[in-house]
Image: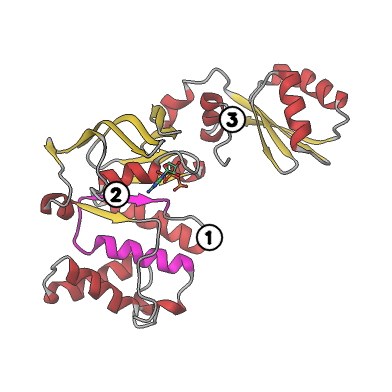
Amino acid sequence: MIQVHHLSKSFQSVKAVDDISFTIAKGEIFGLLGPNGAGKSTTLNIMSTLLKSDVGRILIEGEEIKPNSEASKRLIGVVPQEISLYDELSAYENLLFWGNLYGIPSKELKGRIDHTLELIGLLDRKKDLIKTYSGGMKRRINIAASLLHEPKILLMDEPTVGIDPQSRNRIFEVVETLNKQGMTIVYTTHYMEEVERLCDRIAIIDSGKIVAQGTQKELQELVDTKENIQLEFDFLSTDQVAKLSELLSRNMIQKENQLIIESSIKELSNIITASNQLGLAINDIQLQKVNLETIFLSLTGKQLRD
Ligand SMILES: Nc1ncnc2c1ncn2[C@@H]1O[C@H](COP(=O)(O)OP(=O)(O)OP(=O)(O)O)[C@@H](O)[C@H]1O
């Protein structure tokens, strides 16, 4: 079990992490969901002991983790946001380098490299230079590197940002496979679809604070609305969205010409009247179930992808 108690961390005047606490059960996939700059990486970097918190403690199985302690290095695997590989070396050579850094005996290391390469679906590319890999493939090698020392806990910092769908799917499968084998995983992202698919429990983080945490069902119960209305217009400017939001006193998310309004079917006629008033031509109307993106909007008044 991982217990995070009252962590805070500031960078000059920026409070990156502001008194956050959460508990993760053994074998759980725990999601940290929040927009850019919410404090996800800072939290993860403190958990991996890369960064020291100003205040707060982290306990794993009741033991406080200390920066650079051998015990925490052994227990924790880290998949950072940045790719940390040598372009001029092959995938195999890169993993050999990482394995040696961890002091894994060479006899064991070769088997483990093949095993992790197989897991991430790149065993057949092991001799190819990293410079010939796509961004998504490099991220998968980063994951392999984090697994060589066979950690019990894996911290993943936005592992799918900016990659191709094939690598993204493979990463989901890897997360699910590792979890089935008993690994506890902390997964940060700003993609709500990813936490919906992967995570047992979720903490929603914004401006350094946890605004809510629980299972998806528990989070859904926190908001009044159980549905949203999705409208599609011919054209929609941010100015028009602001006016509509003011007229209806409702939070809304704009995605190009689409608008998701935190509202129920009962208010549909008001929405249509207000849209007409602003000269907005509606092309399509759909009723949507509340999802994590709209829960985030309801709790913070902001869009997840600001
Ligand atoms: N080393 C640093 N020096 C100064 N400010 C920092 C540093 N690291 C993070 N910050 C600031 O702390 C806040 C939280 O950043 P953090 O990287 O933890 O957020 P995040 O949720 O991981 O976002 P992203 O997805 O953009 O990485 C931001 O305002 C960021 O600019």
Please identify, in this view, whether the residue under mark 1 or under mark 3 is nearer the observer.
Answer: 1
Q: Position of residue 208 (x, y in %)?
A: 41, 34
| Left or right of 143 in this view: 37 | right
The answer to whether residue 188 is above or below residue 73 is above
What amino acid is at disc 2?
Asn
The answer to whether residue 217 is above or below residue 164 is above
What amino acid is at disc 3?
Lys
Which quadrant of the figure shows ligand 1?
top left
* Residue segment shown in magenta: 135-158
Within 10 Å of disc 1 (Cα), the crowding (few <14, some 14-19, many 20+) is few
Nearest the viewer among 54 and 242 is: 54
Within 10 Å of disc 2 (Cα), the crowding (few <14, some 14-19, many 20+) is some
Q: Is mark 3 within 8 Å of ligand 1?
A: no
Q: Position of residue 302 (x, y in %)?
A: 57, 31
Q: Position of residue 70 (x, y in %)?
A: 11, 54
Q: Position of residue 60 (x, y in %)?
A: 17, 40
Nearest the viewer among 180 and 6 is: 6
Residue 120, can we see it?
no
| Left or right of 78 in this view: 280 | right
In this view, the residue farthest toward the front is: 12
Q: Earlier in the sequence, mark 1 or mark 3?
A: 1
- 144 is within the stretch colored magenta: yes
Query: Which element carries disc 1, helix, strand or loop?
Result: helix
Q: Residue at x 61, y 25 (%)?
A: 227
Q: In the picture, which quadrant includes the N terminus?
A: top left
The residue where tag 2 is placed is: 179
Q: Which mark is residue 165?
A: 1
Q: Quadrant of residue 293?
A: top right
The answer to whether residue 100 is above or below residue 181 is below
